Image (cartoon, rainbow, N blue to C red):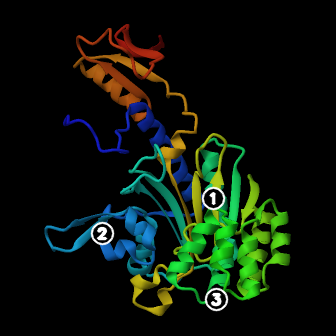
Amino acid sequence: MSAWVLPDHIADVLPSEARHIEELRRELLDTARGYGYELVMPPLLEHLESLLTGTGEALDLQTFKLVDQLSGRTLGLRADTTPQVARIDAHLLGRTALTRLCYCGPVLHTRPARQHATREPLQLGAEIYGHAGPEADLEILQLALDSLHAARLEDLQVDLADARIVNSLLQAQGVDDGLRHEIHAALASKDGSAIARLTAGFAPAHRDGLRALVDLYGDAHVLDLAAQRLPALPEITAALAQLRWLAAHIQGAALSFDLGDSRGYAYYSGMRFAIYAKGAPDALARGGRYDGVGAVFGHRIERDRPAVGFSLDLKELVAVVRPLPLRAAILAPWGDSAGLRSAIADLRSRGETVVCVLPGHESEIDEFHCDRELIEAAGQWVVQAL
């Protein structure tokens, strides 16, 4: 095999795409900063138990593992940044007040999420710690929408669910982990016959509620149907009320609901959402509430902080967003005269891109599409249109 062949689902990012990704990264981090989010930069690898704490089996299977040559302990290359940010909030910052954090960096997956997906996403996200109310849920959802709007995407669709609905029906029955996994898988595939088989021994109200979830998806009328068809358990009542409240306050997107969607059931503890855009093969952003993940890092019960956040992959986003036009650049000759070097330095200090033509390369392609040039006229270096 050639030395330059990369592993499957791993690819170099070439200049034009890299420029587009970097422009989006800056735009989205600035959007988060506009909401008051502080930037953090967790390491790419950590001790495995720290990376996987409270995240469930799915993230374990997606995590590359290696042995630390210094300590002999098992390390993991992060497959998701959220647990690291929860550790920072709980163990390093230790604040009791509300904390807003954002991040952007690569993650690595042992397998692609779907066909043609990369195994090295560039994950950007934001998290709120310390507020259990729906106001934080709304803020993180609105920030996710504003981030996609900042990327010049319109006609967005938000799909809402709440992990408490399925969890409360299963907890009332006291099901084991194996059966829980099968039921979640059947709900994900909308397999009504499998749900009927798996819940045959359940109490009628809980059995009928789980069977009803297969069909409880669509527009806001789903919430009214759910109130009629699901048992009036306290967590279900609270979840439906919060979904109604969010639906009334979300701006800038169409809404849909899928009350049987339980993806990330081992992780999410409340409201969860996915945001879709026309032309994208899958959701561009996902998020929700995951209370309690930070408790294991703080060694104190008060670190069991409420938390809600979202993340997206900039590499997926760049594939569906039109790039900004190249910023106009200036072509300059190469030379070692003090006047020329001073003129070039002055232009660059004012934010201009100045491309110097090295000797012998005057006829090569201009990758920056320079629309002006720096020339000497009457002993002065001036910029004129090409």
User: Dot 1 surroundings within 10 Å: few (below 14), some, or many (20 or more)?
Assistant: many
The picture places residue 108, in percent across and down from the top left corner, at 36, 56
Q: Nearer the viewer, residue 339 or 317?
A: 317
The picture places residue 200, in percent across and down from the top left corner, at 68, 81
Q: Which residue, given by chain and number where applicable, does mark 1 sit on? A: 274
Q: Which mark is residue 324?
A: none
Q: Which residue, given by chain and number where applicable, does mark 3 sit on? A: 173
Q: Is residue 37 left or right of residue 256?
A: left
Q: Residue at x 54, y 50 (%)?
A: 28
Q: Nearer the viewer, residue 275 or 357?
A: 275
Q: Is residue 93 left or right of residue 222?
A: left
Question: Gap between marks 1 and 3, in whole Å?
Answer: 28 Å
Q: Which quadrant would residue 16 be assigned to in this image?
A: top left
Q: Residue at x 31, y 26 (%)?
A: 342
Question: Gap between marks 2 and 1, in whole Å?
Answer: 28 Å
| N-term mark: 1 or 3 | 3
- Above or below residue 74? Residue 294 is below
User: Dot 3 surroundings within 10 Å: few (below 14), some, or many (20 or more)?
Assistant: some
Decide if residue 11 is in sight here.
yes
Q: Residue at x 65, y 43 (%)?
A: 153
Q: Secondary structure at mark 3?
A: loop
Q: Amino acid at mark 3?
A: Gln
In front of the other: label 3 or label 2?
Answer: 3
Q: Secondary structure at mark 1?
A: strand
Question: Gap between marks 3 and 2, in whole Å?
Answer: 37 Å
